[in-house]
Image (tube, coloured by chain):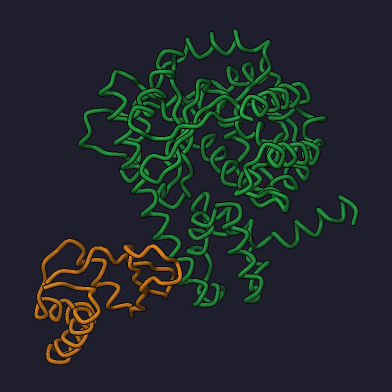
Chain colours: A orange, B green
């Protein structure tokens, strides 16, 4: 899986958003709010192939949480990303 | 309301805007946080003013230096983020078209010089957040200039002569201008001096190599040529002066000038530039400009080309706030109305409005420009 490079990450302090760069109309642009962990994934995954298990392991290392919980969170997140076109198989 | 009182109101009202602009321009923390927090309405004003002056990308950078609790409401923050992505995409597209245009000309034996625009963007820490305008190309000889205009016309593109003698056309959705002069000075007694000055100055090929994000296209066979540091400074300065005397000037051009002084520091001789300003009758004007750059845009005095006492810069501030981007936000400016009389009417009003700057700083230059534009508009009609 890889992220859709047409979406650009924007970070200002603790505000994390990704913005669709392909839409021309200012009022019709898709914008998604991310949490800090999702924004971290987004910035480190740019241009790379990844799997849910890889991300779960990263999450465990970074936040020290149990692998099962990390994997469940990552799978939910990636399901949303795929549904919304933020990531591609 | 009197001019003094009006300026005091302006200054107070614009404090948050200028604080953020300075912070974004120099990528530094805000010196004073006391103008914040501001209300939702005031935030909207800051955003609107930024767009009006085409500095929304620079002010956006400034937001990063505000503490989280002082940031604008999330709805506006998102709007700003969307705008920043749009600016990046526009810059990408413009850079691609510059390369395509340049390749087209070079393959036909014509070598344009890139004036202002994307060359100015390269002076910023984050070039992709500078609002990009037209593509301005300068041609060194009359033959190249005529040939370039002909090459475009032969592509089936409509090319128009403008009042100042330059030509413009639309290249894949982007406005392009062809210029036969590099420096916007119209005093006829200066033409021999300027010609000599330009002949003695080399054009630079590596302006885009200092910052990887500003490179136009690494894989291209051609490098984009830009003027040398001292000529770029003269060119920026004269361009701002022209618009301040005539149609009105926006903050983006002033930001370009401040960044140019900062980035070119040590790459040219300050005394040499002082002599150029002196010979071209720009000393008084430059004093006003330098005062504005230090007082309102936070340029450190050590980056100015030479030492000089400052003067109150309110009249320049007033002209900028009135006109916005090249006068396009002045109340009586109508972009769609391009008729002979409406353009002439707007220009006369604008020159009258900016008379304080003309009379104090560059009366003869204002006279020469006015004469040329009137003749140009008669020719156009």
x, y (%) of residue A86?
24, 73
x, y (%) of residue B375?
68, 23
Please tell me which residue lies in front, B176 or B255: B176
x, y (%) of residue B206?
34, 29
Q: Is residue B26 above or below residue B169?
A: below
Q: Residue at x 72, y 36 (%)?
A: B344
Q: The C terminus of chain B appears in which quarter of the rendering?
A: top right
Q: Is residue A18 above or below residue B92?
A: below
Asked if residue B260 lies left or right of residue B300, the reply is left
x, y (%) of residue B289?
68, 36
Asked if residue B133 lies left or right of residue A10, the reply is right
Q: How many marks?
A: 0
Asked if residue B297 lies left or right of residue B363, the reply is left
- Give the farthest residue toward the right: B2
Q: Residue B372 falls in which quadrant of the image?
A: top right
Q: Residue at x 28, y 21 (%)?
A: B108
Q: Is residue B112 above or below residue B328?
A: above
Q: Residue at x 63, y 22 (%)?
A: B185
Q: Residue at x 78, y 43 (%)?
A: B315
Q: Residue A77 falls in which quadrant of the image?
A: bottom left
Please tell me which residue lies in front, B270 or B160: B160
Please tell me which residue lies in front, B162 or A46: B162
Q: The N terminus of chain B appears in which quarter of the rendering?
A: bottom right
């Amino acid at each position: 899986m890889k992220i859709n490079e047409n979406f650009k990450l924007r970070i200002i302090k603790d505000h994390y958003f990704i913005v669709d760069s392909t839409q021309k109309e200012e009022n019709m642009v898709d914008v998604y709010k991310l949490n800090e962990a999702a924004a971290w994934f987004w910035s480190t995954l740019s241009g790379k192939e990844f799997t849910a298990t890889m991300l779960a392991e990263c999450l465990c290392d970074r936040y020290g949480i149990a692998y099962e919980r990390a994997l469940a969170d990552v799978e939910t997140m990636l399901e949303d990303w795929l549904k919304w076109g933020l990531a591609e198989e | 309301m009197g001019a003094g009182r009006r300026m005091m109101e302006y200054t107070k009202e614009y404090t948050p805007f200028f604080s953020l602009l300075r912070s974004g321009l120099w990528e530094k923390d805000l010196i004073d946080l006391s103008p914040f927090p501001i209300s939702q309405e005031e935030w909207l004003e800051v955003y609107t003013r930024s767009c009006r002056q085409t500095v929304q990308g620079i002010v956006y950078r400034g937001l990063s230096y505000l503490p989280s609790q002082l940031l604008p409401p999330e709805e506006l923050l998102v709007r700003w983020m969307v705008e920043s992505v749009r600016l990046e995409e526009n810059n990408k597209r413009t850079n691609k078209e510059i390369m395509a245009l340049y390749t087209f000309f070079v393959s036909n034996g014509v070598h344009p010089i890139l004036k202002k625009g994307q060359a100015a963007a390269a002076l910023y820490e984050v070039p992709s957040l500078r609002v990009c305008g037209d593509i301005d190309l300068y041609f060194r000889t009359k033959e190249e200039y005529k040939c370039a205009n002909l090459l475009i016309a032969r592509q089936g593109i409509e090319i128009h002569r403008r009042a100042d003698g330059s030509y413009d056309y639309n290249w894949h959705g982007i406005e392009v201008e062809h210029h036969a002069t590099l420096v916007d000075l119209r005093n006829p007694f200066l033409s021999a001096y300027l010609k000599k000055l330009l002949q003695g100055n080399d054009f630079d090929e590596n302006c885009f190599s200092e910052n990887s994000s500003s490179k136009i296209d690494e894989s291209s066979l051609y490098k984009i040529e830009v003027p040398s540091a001292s000529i770029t400074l003269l060119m920026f300065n004269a361009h701002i002066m022209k618009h301040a005397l005539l149609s009105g000037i926006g903050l983006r051009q002033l930001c370009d000038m401040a960044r140019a002084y900062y980035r070119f520091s040590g790459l040219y001789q300050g005394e040499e530039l002082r002599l150029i300003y002196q010979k071209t009758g720009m000393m008084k004007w430059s004093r006003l400009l330098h005062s504005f750059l230090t007082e309102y845009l936070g340029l450190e005095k050590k980056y100015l080309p030479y030492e000089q006492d400052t003067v109150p810069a309110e009249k320049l501030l007033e002209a900028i706030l009135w006109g916005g981007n090249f006068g396009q936000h002045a109340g009586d400016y109508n972009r769609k109305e391009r008729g002979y009389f409406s353009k002439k009417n707007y220009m006369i009003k604008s020159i009258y409005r900016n008379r304080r700057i003309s009379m104090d700083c560059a009366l003869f230059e204002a006279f020469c420009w006015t004469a040329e534009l009137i003749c140009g508009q008669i020719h156009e009609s």
